[in-house]
Amino acid sequence: MSVVTASPSLPATPSASTPAPAVPAPAPAKPATVTLAKALNQALADAMTADERVVVFGEDVAELGGVFRITDGLAARFGESRCFDTPLAEASILGTAIGMAMYGYRPVVEMQFDAFAYPAFEQLVSHLSKMRNRTRGALPMPIVIRIPYGGGIGGVEHHSDSSEAYIAHTPGIHVITPATVQDAYWLLRSAIASPDPVVFFEPKRLYWSKAQLTLPVTTGPIGTAAIRRTGRDLTLIAYGQTVPVALETAEHAAELGYDLEVLDLRSLVPFDDATVLASVERTGRAIVIHEAAGFAGFGAEIAARISERCFYRLEAPVLRVTGLDIPYPPPKLEHWHLPSVDRVLDAVEHAMTA
Amino acid sequence: MSVVTASPSLPATPSASTPAPAVPAPAPAKPATVTLAKALNQALADAMTADERVVVFGEDVAELGGVFRITDGLAARFGESRCFDTPLAEASILGTAIGMAMYGYRPVVEMQFDAFAYPAFEQLVSHLSKMRNRTRGALPMPIVIRIPYGGGIGGVEHHSDSSEAYIAHTPGIHVITPATVQDAYWLLRSAIASPDPVVFFEPKRLYWSKAQLTLPVTTGPIGTAAIRRTGRDLTLIAYGQTVPVALETAEHAAELGYDLEVLDLRSLVPFDDATVLASVERTGRAIVIHEAAGFAGFGAEIAARISERCFYRLEAPVLRVTGLDIPYPPPKLEHWHLPSVDRVLDAVEHAMTA
Amino acid sequence: MTLLDLPLAATRGNPAAAASYWDTDPLRYLDEHGAPVEGGLRPAPELLATDRLLALYRALRLARAFDTEATALVMQGHLAVYPSSRGQEACQAAAALCLEPQDWLFPTYRDTAALALRGIDPVEALTLLRGSWHCGYDAKRWRTAPQCTPLATQAPHAVGLALAAKMAGDPVVALCLLGDGATSEGDFHEACNSAAVYQAPVVFLVQNNQYAISVPLRKQTHALSLAGKGVGYGMPGVRVDGNDVIGLMHVLGEAIERARGGGGPTLIEAITYRIRPHTNADDANRYRDTSEVDLWLGRDPVDRLARYLTAIGHLDAGLDAAIGEEGAKYAAAMREQLAREPEVDPADLFDHVFASPTPQLRAQRAMIEAEAAAAQRDGQQDAAHGGQA
Amino acid sequence: MTLLDLPLAATRGNPAAAASYWDTDPLRYLDEHGAPVEGGLRPAPELLATDRLLALYRALRLARAFDTEATALVMQGHLAVYPSSRGQEACQAAAALCLEPQDWLFPTYRDTAALALRGIDPVEALTLLRGSWHCGYDAKRWRTAPQCTPLATQAPHAVGLALAAKMAGDPVVALCLLGDGATSEGDFHEACNSAAVYQAPVVFLVQNNQYAISVPLRKQTHALSLAGKGVGYGMPGVRVDGNDVIGLMHVLGEAIERARGGGGPTLIEAITYRIRPHTNADDANRYRDTSEVDLWLGRDPVDRLARYLTAIGHLDAGLDAAIGEEGAKYAAAMREQLAREPEVDPADLFDHVFASPTPQLRAQRAMIEAEAAAAQRDGQQDAAHGGQA
Ligand SMILES: Cc1ncc(C[n+]2csc(CCOP(=O)(O)OP(=O)(O)O)c2C)c(N)n1
Ligand SMILES: Cc1ncc(C[n+]2csc(CCOP(=O)(O)OP(=O)(O)O)c2C)c(N)n1
Ligand SMILES: [Mg+2]
Ligand SMILES: [Mg+2]
C-alpha cells in the first residue's frame, strides 16, 4: 500500500548475532602474578580490543575506573564512547544496554553493588531474559551485567547482598561467578563473547586475591564446573566467595581423616549436572555452601537435584551451609552470618557420621 | 545543646505496632455461596471496617474496583481517602505504603499483575523486608501487597508470572497464597492484621471459583499448611493455583489404586515444616507442584527440606512437577507449560514404582 | 516556536486544569472543524502537497479500518485481547509516516495500527494480541521493537538504540511511543534524563489519551502539561493537538530533523482521547461519562482531515469512497487470515530461550515432544491439557 | 518570587552550563563574602533576630566539629566508612533547624551531622557508619527515618508519611534530603509526581554538591537547573545558594509553611559543594582538580555567616572562641565514646526480622547461641569466624 513507508530491503544494522571474534584475543603476554580485580580489568581491555562492538558503561566506570577499579584505564585507553559514565539510574543503565544490543552492540554494564542492581530488576526479568525468545532470535541480547557480590568486606547495609537465586530462577539468563584469577579472566571473556545475556557475579571479597595469569588462558566453556580438589568421602559444592571456604575446610577435614572433593560450580546457569552428579555418585555425600540466605536459595536447587538424581547412591542427606535467613548483618556481626569453615566442618562431621 | 530543636517528649504517632483489632470483625453473616474474588473483596471491606488505619490503594482500585474487581465498592463505601487510585508507578506505590506504615497506617496495596510488581522490587527487598530489623522494631511494616499471580487465563506476555520464589528468598517478608474461598477471606484478614509485611499471592485463575462462606470463619493461623485430602501412599504438595490440580490428580490416582495425600501449603513463609514433614514421614513419598519455572523455584526448597529431613524415610526421590524453564508462553501454548494432571500422574507412577 | 512556554502559575492548584486541558491551546494546524488555525503551525509546503495529504488521509482511514476490524475480531474471540486506538488514528498515522525506513519505532500494546501502517502484515502485527506468540514480526527487519507492555520500559531501549546509532554515525532516529499514564513511571524519567545527557537522537511521543485504564489524567499529574516535563531534562517539550495529523507530522518532523542533525531528544505530548474502553475486557462506564466520549467523537481526527481536504477541493465523494474501499479490502483480508486458528508449535517454546538450549532445556523439550506424540497417537490433544480447564 | 524562572534556551546545548552553574544566580540572602545581596531574599525579622542567627552559627560550627571528628575517627579505623558533609554544613544545619519536633526528617548516609543537630546522640547517629547496627537511634521517637543508602528510595517514604499525616489531620511536614545524583533515579520522579498529585506536605531538599561520587553534574543532567524539574510535577521549584544558611532557612521556611498550610510539596535545589572525597575510601584526585576545591573553600558556609555576624556586631573573637569550645567539647565527647569497641549481640540478628521469629529463625538462633557459648568456653572467639579472614 502506498501508505507504507518502511522498506525491509535496507542494509542490516551491525549484527549482534555475528559471533564475537574468537576468544582469547591478542598476543600472548608473559606470566604475571595479578589480582582477580586486575584479571577482570585485563579481560575487559582485551575484549574491547578484540571487538569494537563491546562498550562498557555504568556509574563511575570512566574517570574513576569504578569503585573497585575494575574498569580502570578503559576510558583513557578506548575513549569515552567505549567506556562512559551514565546518569545515576540502574533501570536505564540496563535498558540502555538492551537498546544498544538491539542495534548490534555488546554492552558490558557495571552495577556498583549487588543491592543497587535491584532497580533494574524489571528490565532484567521482563526484557533482558525474554527479548531473544520474544523475537524468535531476531533481537539477541549479548549483554553482560557485572555485579560485585557477597559479604565479608565490612560493608554497611546494602553492600554485601548475594542475589544469585533471583537471577538463576529467571529463564533466559546465564549466571556465572568466578572464584579464581584464571576464571575471572576467561569467564568474563567468555561471557562477553556469549550471544546470550550473562549476569556475572564478581566475588568482591576475592578481588585482591592473587595468582599467576598467563595469557592466553582457557579454563573451560560456560556451563562447566571445576573440580578444585578430588576426594573420595564427600563433595563440597561451592561457587564464588565460598570456594576458598570449601578448600580450607577440606584441608582441616583431611587432618580429621576425611577426604573431601571440592567443586567450584562457576556457572549456576547453565548448571553442570554431569560434573556435579558424577562427583556425588562417587562420594555418596554432598554439602552445598553459599553466602545467600539458605531459604529458597540457590543451594536448594542443588540439594534438590542431587537428592532426586543420586537418590539411590546417597549415604547421608545433602546438607546446606549458608547465610542465615535474615537481612544481611552490619559489619560487626557479619561473621555470624557467613558460612564459616567451622560450620562446614560440623556439617561434614554430621554427614560422615550419618 | 540549644541548637537542638527536636524534642523526644511528643505524643507518639498512631502506632503501627498496636495490634489490629481481633479478627474476624463484624456481625456473623448468613451462609452464602461466593467467588474467591468476592471473599477477598469482603475481607478488605471487613478489615477496613474493623480498623480505620487500614487503607487500600493502587492502580485502578477506586472507581474501577480493580481490573479483577477485588476492591469493588470500597472507594464508594469508605471514601477515596481510604481507597484511592495512585499514579502509575509501582515503586512509589510500595514506597508510599512504607511511609504510611511509618506513620502508623496499615496499607494494603494492589499490584495489577505479577510482572508489574517488579518495578517495586528494590523497595521490597531493600526496605519493606528490612525496615523492622533495621530499626530494631521501631518501624514495623504492617503492609500487605496483593498480587494476582499465575497463568492459565489466556493472558498475553507479563500477565501470568509466578514470582513467589523471589519473595520467599527475601528474609523479612511473609508469603501467603490461598487456594480456597475460606482461606481467601481468612488469610487476607490475617495478613492485614499481621504486624509484618505480607506478599499475598492471589490465584487469579481461581478468582471465579465458588464455595460457601459463612462469617466469621477461621481456617488456621499464618504459617500453617492444610491437609486437603489424607492418603497413605504419597504426599502431593501444592499451593495456590496448583491445589485443584493436585486434588484432581488424587482423584485419578485413586482409580489407579494410589491413595494420595494432598497438602495446601497456604503459607510459603513461614514454612510449615511440622505438617509437611509429618505427612511425608507417613507416606514416604512426595511430589511438589507449582506453576513457576522449576529451576531454583520454590519447589526446590520444599524438595531439599524433605530430602534432608525425611532422608531415612523416603522410599522414592522427591519429584517436582513445575512450569518449564522458559519465559511464560503465549496463550495458545501455555497449556504445555503448566503442570497438568497428566504430568503429575506420570510423576506419581514414577514415584510409586521407584 | 514549538518550544513549550508554560505559565507556571497555571501548573499549581488549578482544579480546572484537567477540564480545560484541551483548550489551553496545544499547537495545531487544523482546528477541530478542519479549518486552518489563525496563527497556528505553519508546515513546510511538501507536507501540504496534495499527494502527501491524501497519503495521510488514506493512512487515517486504514488505521480506522484496522481498528474497527480488530475490535470485531476480539469480540468474536479471534484475538485474546485488543486495546483499541480508535480516536488516536492521527497519532498512529503520524508515528508510522514520520519515520524513514532506517529509523526505529518503539510501540506499545495500543499501537498495532501504527505497525500496520509501517507496512507490517496485520497477522504478524496482531500475533501478540492473538496469543500465538509474543511478537509476530521480524523486529530487526522492520526496525520496529516488539510492542511493549510493561509501561515505559521501552523508553530506555529507544534511548540505547538511538545512542548506539549515534555512536555508529548512522542517521537513525528512534521514535518511542508512550501513554500519559506511562509518564508516571520511573523508567520514563530515567530514559528522558539520559537521552538528554547523551543527546541521543530519540523522540518521545506521549499519546495523552486522558486515561490510564480508569485513571484520569488529573490523578496522574498535578502539572497542566506533560510536555512541561521536558524542562527538567533540558529537552524541548512540545504540546500538540493529537487529533490534527498535519500538526503532528509537522511537530514530529521538526523533532526528528533536530534529532538526526545532532540536536538531541524531544518530548512531544499529543493531546487525544481513547474513544473505546481500555481493552475489550474493560467497562468504561464505571469511570467516565458517555457525554465525554461524545464530545471527543466530535473531534474525530479522520473527519477533520476529510473536511479540510474537501474544503480545499482535494477530496470528493468518489475518491473518498475509493479510499474507503481500500480500507474495506484491507479489513476483509485481515479477517480472512485472523479468523483461522493459528498454527503453533510447542518446539518454539525451547528454541529461542538461548542461542543454543541448555541440557536442562533439551530434556524438557524431549518431554514435551513425547507428550505431543502421545497426544497425537491417542488423537486426544485435550488430554495433554488435563487440569488446565 | 521563590519560584524558578528558567530561561529555557539556557537548558539546551549549553556546555558552559556546568561551569556557570553557581553564577546563574540562585536565591540568596548573603553573598559569598557574607554581605547581604542587593535585591536578594528578604527573610522575616524573626529569622534575623540575634539569638536565632547565633543559634544558626553554633549549629554550623557544631556540624563542622562533628564532621571533622568523624573524619578523624574513620581514618583511625573507629568507623567502617564515613561520607563527609564538609562544605555542606549550611544544608545540614538548615535541614535540622527548619523543622518542628513533630516533623519528620528523611536523611541519607551523608547527613549524619544533621542527625546530631536534630538532637540525636552522636553514637546513635553514627551506628550505621560504625558498623554495629543499621540504625542506632529510635527513628520514631526522633521523627527521623533511618539514614537511607539506596539512592532516592527514601523519597516515596517521605511522600507516604506526609500523606498519612495529612489524612490524620496532623500538622506534620516531611523533609526529604537527596543528592544531585539521586535526582536521576526513577524513585525520585515517582515520589515528586505522586507528592504533587496527593498535594502531600513534603519538601524535597536536593543538596546539589556537584558530584555523585566521581560523576559531575553535567553527566547527570542536561538541564541548567535541578529545581526546574518542579515544572514537570506542577510543583514549585526553588534554586538557592546552599552555602547561605540564612537563605536556606528562609526558603525552607516558606516551603514548610506552604506544605503545612495545605499548599503541597516543594522542590528545593541547594547549590553547594562536597569538599572531601565521596567517602574516606574515595580518591577524588582521580576525577577533579584541587583548584576546584580551593575555589569552594573560599565559599565556606561557616565563614560566611561568621563574617556577617561580625560585620553586624553580633560576633566577636571572645564569643567565637566560646562557640568553638562548645564544638570542641562535643567532639571530644564523641571521640571518647566512639573510640571504644561497641557492644554487639548476635541475638540481635534474629529478634527483629519479624514481630515473632519463625520456627526456622528460632532454630538458627539456637545454633548461633551454641556457637557463641562454645567460643566463650574455648575462649577462642576467632575460631568461630574461621574462613572469614
Ligand atoms: C509497569 C506496568 N504497570 C501496570 C501495567 C498495567 N497496565 C496496562 S495498560 C495500563 C494503563 C496505561 O495507561 P497509558 O500509559 O496512558 O496508556 P494507554 O493504555 O492509555 O494507551 C496499565 C496500568 C503495565 N502494563 N505495566
Ligand atoms: C540505587 C543506588 N545506586 C547506586 C548507589 C551507590 N552510590 C552510593 S552514593 C552514590 C553517589 C550519590 O550521589 P548524590 O546523590 O549526588 O549524593 P552525594 O553522595 O553527593 O551526597 C552512589 C552512586 C546507591 N547507594 N544506590
Ligand atoms: Mg492513556
Ligand atoms: Mg552529590
Image (cartoon, coloured by chain):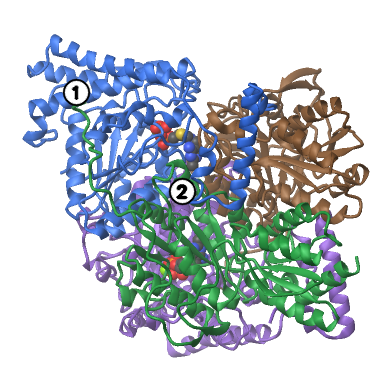
Chain colours: A green, B brown, C blue, D purple
Question: Can you see residue D82?
Answer: no
Q: Are marks 2 and 1 in contact (CB under 8 Å)?
A: no
Question: Can you see residue D290?
Answer: yes
As drawn, the label of residue B123 is none
> Alpha carbon of mark 2 to alpha carbon of mark 1: how far?
39 Å
Q: Residue at x 30, y 42 (%)?
A: C143
Identify the amino acid type marked 1: Tyr
Label 1, secondary structure: give it: helix
Identify the amino acid type marked 2: Glu
Picture coordinates of residue B35, whole percent (x, y)? 70, 22
Which of C359/C72 is in front? C359
Residue B345's quadrant in the figure? top right
| Horizontal side of residue A176 vs D313, given as left or right | right
As drawn, the label of residue D190 is 2
Picture coordinates of residue A211, whole percent (x, y)? 56, 84
Which of D179/A227 is in front? A227
Q: Chain of mark 2?
A: D
Which of A228/C83 is in front? A228
Marks 2 & 1 on one chain: no
Residue A343's quadrant in the figure? bottom right
As drawn, the label of residue C57 is 1
Q: Chain of mark 1?
A: C
Q: Residue at x 72, y 26 (%)?
A: B39
Crowd band around label 1 with a 10 angstrom C-alpha radius: few (<14), some (14–19), many (20+): many
Which of C160/A258 is in front? A258
Residue D78's quadrant in the figure? bottom right
